[in-house]
Image (cartoon, rainbow, N blue to C red):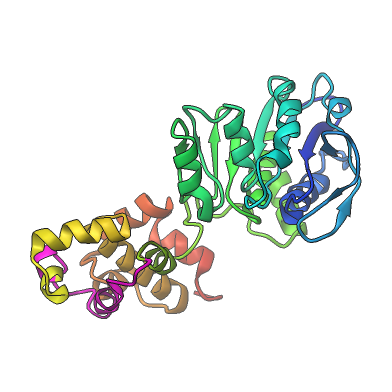
Amino acid sequence: MTDGPRTVIVTAYDGAKLMDVAGPMQAFSEARRPDGSPAYQVVLASEDGRTVTTDTGVRLETVRLDDAVRPGVDTLLVSGGDLTHPLTVTESLRSCLAEHLDRPRRLGSICTGAFILAELGVLDGRPATTHWAYCRQLQSEHPAVEVDPDAIFVTAGRVWTSAGVSAGIDMALAMIEEDLGHEAALSVARTMVLFLKRPGGQSQFSVELRQQMRDVHGRFDELHDWIRANLGADLSVPALAGVARMSPRNFARVYLRETGESPARAVEKLRLAAARRRLEHTDDPVRVVARHTGFGDDERMRRAFVKALGVSPQDYRSRFGRPGD
């Protein structure tokens, strides 16, 4: 442990999202060392140290980034903003950041702040994430980045990236746990009335919503409704093609083109979503949930949960099930 509080710098600019700035700052500000003293000195910085106006209209006082980044700075975080603004909004900030990227022990971004790090080349060859709505754009504009569209946050050596809004707090809690240990992070989570850690790899939004947004033309809406109502049926490509009144080969090709994933992958995700709902809202045994949602047996469902969410069905229920289950 360092002698004094670790310095955490959060960078902001006009149009930065208030929650991206305030959420992590609050988490770090709540952290305490064993003697009760603050564990972090949290600094809000901008390129020129002027007052910045966030996306909500709230104005925040800042200090100059050049003055804030002193030797020994521990963590530098880049907040996200509205991507409808042109990149010129952060062009000058990026130039300023480029001079300081090697100084912090740890570097990170919140939400669309990943685009700023990507523009600086920090994320090249690394796994990273951002808000689910912009993952495809990040991958398209920066093909050297290994974009993970599902993760709440991603660590790659000294570089951390998080998904949207509240995920910045999840990432901050994980950093606190790495620095100070489990109990210190748990204390912050309790103070802020939060889960200490959402399951690793937990999807940023529901499978159903993902399916709706990818199938923008709604071509397979009726098929998806049929699958949800028949999760225990034969859901092979030939069977689904028959329901869609298409040849199996044409169905597989068109489905992949319209939704961005194979029919088999979509079926597993819909079964997973149904299993999650049952685990959250019923006290059915896991083996019964597996049977009703088409997994067949609890071991197959367990493997699907671990692969997609990073936790077993039992662990998922303990976090998100009804109180008392």
- Visible residue check, residue 13: yes
Q: Is residue 16 above or below residue 195?
A: above
Residue under the image location 78 percent in, 52 percent down? 22
Name the one closer to the observer, 283 or 94: 94
Q: Quadrant of the N terminus?
A: top right
| Residue 168 left/right relative to 27 | left
Residue located 26% across and 81% down the image: 229
Q: Residue at x 70, y 31 (%)?
A: 94
Q: As drawn, is 294 to the left or to the right of 22? A: left
Indicate yes or no whether the magenta region holds residue 187.
no
Specify start and end residues of the magenta stretch as a single range: 216-239
Report the front residue among 274 and 68: 68
274 w.r.t. 143: above or below: below
Q: Position of residue 188 (x, y in %)?
A: 75, 51
Residue 218: say if magenta: yes
Residue 140, image quadrant = top left
